[in-house]
Image (cartoon, rainbow, N blue to C red):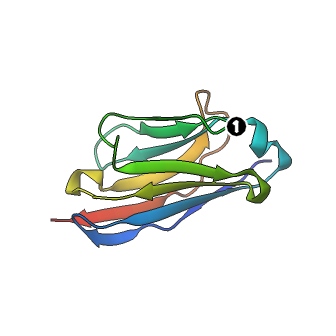
Amino acid sequence: QVQLVESGGGLVQAGGSLRLSCAVSGSIFRINTMGWYRQAPGKQRELVAHITSGGITNYADSVKGRFTISRDNAKNTVYLQMNSLKPEDTAVYYCNKYPVVSWAWGQGTQVTVSS
């Protein structure tokens, strides 16, 4: 069974940066498109960015130019570099497959951006 372990969140001031990591168990990681998702209080979970097995990336308009998704297939890990953070980026961040979420969600990592 695939397990997802997100880390790297924290409390940061507006304009600051964080780097999130998601470790994925299992050798099937490298063939899957991976996504970072987030869920703010009272809101639905939304896709932030995704990256194909070959490294092609795509971003939600709200984070374009500020966030960078990357992956290390040798380490079964996907990353999200977040710069110029805004209070509206406050959420729990998760990783999973994209577009079909067929793995159980991990615990996520909390990102809180203060104004």
Residue at screen point 30% across, 56% down:
90
Q: Position of residue 62 (x, y in %)?
A: 29, 39
As helix, strand or loop, the secondary structure at mark 1 comes to loop
Q: Position of residue 73 (x, y in %)?
A: 74, 51
26 relative to 91 in the view: left or right: right
Residue at screen point 46% across, 49% down:
68
Seen as rendered, the residue at the extreme right is 27
Q: Position of residue 16 (x, y in %)?
A: 29, 67
107 or 46: which is nearer to us?
46
Q: Is residue 58 above or below residue 96?
A: above
Amino acid type of the residue that numbered disc 1 sits on in the rendered structure:
Ser
21 or 5: which is nearer to us?
21
Which residue corresponds to mark 1? 53
Residue at screen point 74% across, 54% down:
76
Residue at screen point 35% across, 66% down:
17
Q: Is residue 36 above or below residue 85?
A: above
